[in-house]
C-alpha cells in the first residue's frame, strides 16, 4: 500500500490535554468513566477492534512483575470497572478487545510485550475474572502485528 492510498495522518505527538482537562473539570471527584486508548474498524474482519495499553511500570520489576507476567486478574479488585466497561463496550459494538502489557522504551523489560485477546470478563469469577488468550511478543513482533492491524483500518480508494 502506498502512502497516498491512506487518508489519515501519522501520529506526530501525544495529546494529553483532554485528559488534563477532564481531570481539572472533575476537581478530584472519582471518575465514573474510562479512558481507552484505541478503537478502529478492521476492514478484513468487518468489526471494530479496541486496544487498551497497560503500562508495566519499572517499580513493579523489583517485585517480579514484568509485561510477560502481569495480568489484569492480578489487580482486578483495584481496577475492575475499567475491564468490565471495556468488555461491555466491546460486546455492544461486536468488537474484538485486546489488552497489551508493555513497559517504557529504555527499561529493563522494554522488549516484552504481552498481547491478550479478551475472551470474557466475568466479575463474579473470583479466580479468573478476565479470560484471555495470551501471546508473548518482542517489541518488534508487536510492532509488526500492530502495523498490520492499523493497515486493516485504513480506508483505501
Image (cartoon, helix red, strand yellow):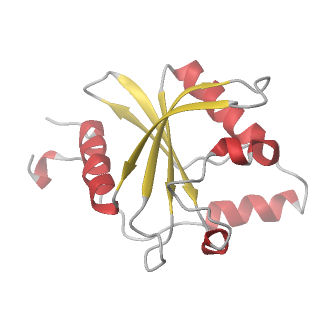
Instruction: Report the residue that reaches farthest toward the bottom.
Output: 106
Give the position of the C terminus as an image quadrant. Answer: top left
Seen from the viewer's position, the closer of residues 39 and 58 is: 58
The x, y position of residue 89, in whole percent, is 61, 28
In this rendering, would 15 be left or right of 77? left
Seen from the viewer's position, the closer of residues 142 and 27 is: 142
The x, y position of residue 55, in whole percent, is 57, 61
In this rendering, would 32 be left or right of 98? right
Seen from the viewer's position, the closer of residues 58 and 156 is: 58
Instruction: Report the residue that reaches farthest toward the left.
Output: 2
Counting labels gives: 0
The x, y position of residue 95, in whole percent, is 48, 25
The x, y position of residue 17, in whole percent, is 62, 67
- Using the image, determine if residue 125 lies above or below residue 144: above
- Using the image, determine if residue 63 lies above or below residue 132: below
- The residue lying at 55 percent from left, 62 percent from top is 66
- The residue lying at 13 percent from left, 46 percent from top is 5
- Using the image, determine if residue 2 lies above or below residue 59: above
In this rendering, would 49 be left or right of 64? left
- The residue lying at 37 percent from left, 32 percent from top is 41
In this rendering, would 86 be left or right of 77? left
Instruction: Report the residue that reaches farthest toward the front.
Output: 64
Amino acid at each position: 500500500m502506498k502512502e497516498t492510498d491512506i487518508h489519515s495522518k501519522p501520529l506526530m505527538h501525544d495529546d494529553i490535554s483532554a485528559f488534563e482537562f477532564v481531570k481539572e473539570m472533575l476537581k478530584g471527584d472519582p471518575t465514573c468513566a474510562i479512558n481507552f486508548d484505541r478503537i478502529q474498524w478492521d476492514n478484513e474482519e468487518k468489526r471494530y477492534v479496541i486496544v487498551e495499553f497497560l503500562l508495566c511500570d519499572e517499580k513493579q520489576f523489583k517485585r517480579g512483575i514484568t509485561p510477560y507476567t502481569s495480568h489484569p486478574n492480578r489487580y482486578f479488585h483495584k481496577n475492575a470497572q475499567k475491564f468490565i466497561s471495556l468488555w461491555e463496550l466491546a460486546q455492544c459494538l461486536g468488537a474484538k478487545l485486546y489488552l497489551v502489557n508493555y513497559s517504557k522504551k529504555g527499561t529493563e523489560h522494554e522488549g516484552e510485550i504481552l498481547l491478550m485477546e479478551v475472551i470474557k470478563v466475568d466479575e463474579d469469577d473470583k479466580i479468573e475474572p478476565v479470560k484471555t488468550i495470551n501471546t508473548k511478543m518482542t517489541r518488534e513482533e508487536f510492532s509488526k502485528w500492530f502495523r498490520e492491524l492499523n493497515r486493516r483500518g485504513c480506508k483505501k480508494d
